[in-house]
């Protein structure tokens, strides 16, 4: 397996580190990921970002193929955890697909004492327009503490959708007002823009991480 480099923000490895993977169609250095990394690092956390192999190949001029199924990406996420130099507490997570994969490997790593939680940014509870195709089975019995930051009108799982799910008590939800899958609100509706929701997500994540210690 080819090992791709980490993109690091926020200081030394003795701090609490958040290891983040990207979403299905966008790389680790998108404006969204940059804003989250900056927001968390600015609050004193260390952030490490990495790319799954299919996305790294796109960056190097490879074909723009759809991502492998989430189950196949678990091995790559586990490999990233193993090679990240981290002396302090470790939280894993990511944007959409990245957060979903992290949540799928979380309980094994948590039971081994290798992580202390999972941070999901825009969890894809179901494909847009297909609420019957839930991706929540493993979330019902999740043991690892988790925070899901979700836009209230996210087509992958709105507030109304998620309120009806049988999620584990280990999962906390942070709802971002009027946010879509990228947490972006409609300024004409809310009076504020994306920066407001991204900052709120980072603040909630920081407070949650502090509570894990």
Image (cartoon, rainbow, N blue to C red):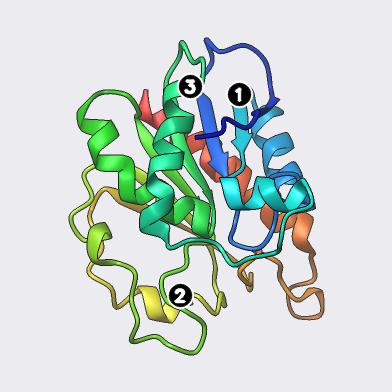
Camera-near label (1 vs 2) is: 1
Query: Which of these two is toward me, 49 or 193?
Result: 49
* Residue lying at the far bottom of the rendered structure: 129
Camera-near label (3 vs 1) is: 3
Left or right, 14 with reference to 40: left
Where residue 197 sits: x, y (%)?
68, 57
Query: Which of these two is toward me, 73 or 22?
Result: 73
The number of discs equals 3
Q: Residues within 10 Å of mark 2 (few under 14, many from 20)?
A: some
Among the two numbered marks 1 and 2 on one chain, the one whose residue lies closer to the N terminus: 1
Where residue 123 sits: x, y (%)?
47, 62
Residue 144 visible in image: no
Q: Residue at x 64, y 29 (%)?
A: 6
Q: Residues within 10 Å of mark 1 (few under 14, many from 20)?
A: many
Kindly identify which numbered label has been placed on residue 46. Answer: 1
Which quadrant of the figure has residue 90? top left
Q: Residue at x 54, y 15 (%)?
A: 15
Q: Are marks 3 and 1 in contact (CB under 8 Å)?
A: no
In the rendered view of the protein, which quadrant contains the C terminus? Answer: top left
Left or right, 176 with reference to 197: left
Among the two numbered marks 3 and 1 on one chain, the one whose residue lies closer to the N terminus: 1
Residue for badge 3: 83
Where residue 93 sits: x, y (%)?
48, 44
Looking at the image, is 85 positioned above or below residue 182?
above
Q: Are marks 1 and 2 in contact (CB under 8 Å)?
A: no
Residue for badge 2: 159
Among the two numbered marks 2 and 3 on one chain, the one whose residue lies closer to the N terminus: 3
């Amino acid at each position: 397996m080819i090992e791709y480099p980490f993109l690091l923000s926020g200081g030394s490895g003795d701090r609490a580190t958040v290891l983040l993977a990207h979403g299905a169609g966008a790389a680790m250095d998108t404006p969204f990921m940059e804003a989250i990394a900056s927001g968390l690092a600015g609050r004193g956390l260390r952030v490490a970002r990495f790319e799954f192999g299919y996305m790294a190949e796109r960056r190097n001029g490879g074909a723009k193929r759809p991502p492998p199924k989430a189950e196949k990406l678990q091995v790559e996420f586990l490999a990233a955890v193993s090679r990240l130099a981290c002396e302090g507490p470790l939280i894993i997570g990511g944007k959409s697909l990245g957060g979903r994969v992290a949540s799928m490997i979380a309980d094994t790593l948590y039971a081994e004492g290798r992580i202390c939680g999972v941070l999901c940014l825009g969890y894809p509870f179901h494909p847009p327009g297909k609420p019957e195709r839930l991706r929540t089975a493993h979330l019902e019995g999740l043991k690892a503490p988790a925070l899901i930051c979700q836009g209230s009108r996210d087509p992958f799982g709105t507030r109304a959708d998620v309120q009806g799910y049988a999620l584990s008590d280990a999962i906390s939800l942070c709802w971002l007002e009027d946010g879509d899958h990228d947490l972006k609100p409609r300024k004409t509706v809310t009076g504020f823009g994306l920066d407001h929701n991204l900052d709120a997500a980072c603040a909630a994540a920081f407070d949650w991480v502090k509570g894990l210690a």
